[in-house]
Amino acid sequence: MDILKLRSFVMVARLGHLTRAADRLALTQPAVTAHIKAIEQEIGIALFDRSPGKITLTRSGEVLLGEAEHVLSVFEGFARKARQIKGEVTGSMLIATVDDADFIKLGGLLYGLRAALPLLQIKTRLVLADDVVSGIKSGLFDAGFYIGAVDHPDFAVQPLRSIAYCTVGPAAYGEQLAQAGWRAVAELPWIAGPERSHVSRLLRLLFAQQGVLPNEAVECDQLPSMLDLVRSGLGMGLVREDLALVAAEKGEVAIWPHGRIESNLSFIFRVAEEHDPAIVGMLSVLRDHWQIQGQGVDPR
């Protein structure tokens, strides 16, 4: 049973008319009728006596009307208080970001934050993954997106999604990669990310598990450009699987099927700040934007 159905019950009871209740609620009459029927089926009690052109409360309906009005009053008070709190959140927050803005849905998040917390000034900084952690720990950043595992008692983590990365090379490497083993692939020229990036960390972990290290011929700090550099023929790279599959289907790169590693995208902040109104409001918008249900913050 939800609030919308309770609103329909209370409005019909007050007005004694389905059509007028529907107009007040900006719903159709069939929708209001369905709400009433759903409540009656759920509780197993008839709320209204129906006759042509007339609808009146049953004795049970009269008893339950007061309870329904109380529930609505409490809910509306809660919503009103929440709106007041949002309107009072002021100050500024600096959010660290990683990867590309589309992947972390940054634009939609900022739009939602602007609408929900209009007095809060939001700033973002694109940094390397390990700098997200150190920046939040030092107080440089208030919160941030992070790729990888976070296991620190000072951090709270809101999981967002899993990510997979795969090993890709220029299309010209296709036949060579089809026959290559770990050592042969490691000896090829590699485009590596900066030392403190998630790409560098994942690449070295992937090959360390096989007892070899990749030949890092080039380091590129423009991580979103990694796929473009591989396409150009510069060397091998570790690329997000969703991007790599599209490029491979177009014949732009070759995927080595054995070099795949999984990680996670999360939103992290200091546990000590979990009750800060700005953090609370930001998490509410973030969960709504990412459509997260039933997966709350994980305190480390």
Image (cartoon, helix red, strand yellow):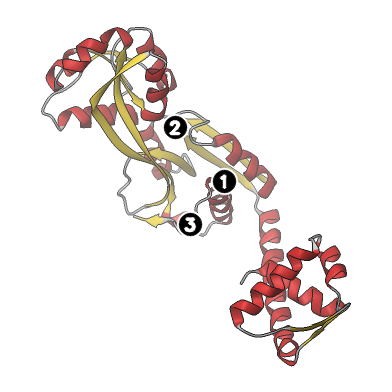
Q: Position of residue 262 (x, y in %)?
A: 30, 37
Instruction: Name which residue lies at 49% across and 44% down.
Output: 142
- Tags 2 and 3 touching, CB below 8 Å: no
Mark 2 or mark 3: whose residue is earlier in sequence: 2
In which quadrant of the rendered image does the N terminus lie? bottom right
Q: Position of residue 197 (x, y in %)?
A: 34, 28
Name the side, left or right, on which 125 lies relative to 217: right
- Tags 1 and 2 touching, CB below 8 Å: no
Work out whether 278 lies above or below 251. below
Query: Which residue is the site of mark 3?
Result: 274
Dot 1: element: helix
Name the side, left or right, on which 186 lies relative to 297: left
Q: Nearer the viewer, residue 281 or 79?
A: 79
Q: Residues within 10 Å of mark 1 (few under 14, many from 20)?
A: some
Instruction: Name which residue lies at 41% across and 37% down.
Output: 132
Mark nearest the camera among 2 and 3 is 2
Q: Check residue 229 in the rendering and tell me which mark sits there, or answer none.
A: none
Mark 1 or mark 3: whose residue is earlier in sequence: 3
Q: Residues within 10 Å of mark 3 (few under 14, many from 20)?
A: some
Camera sees residue 195: no
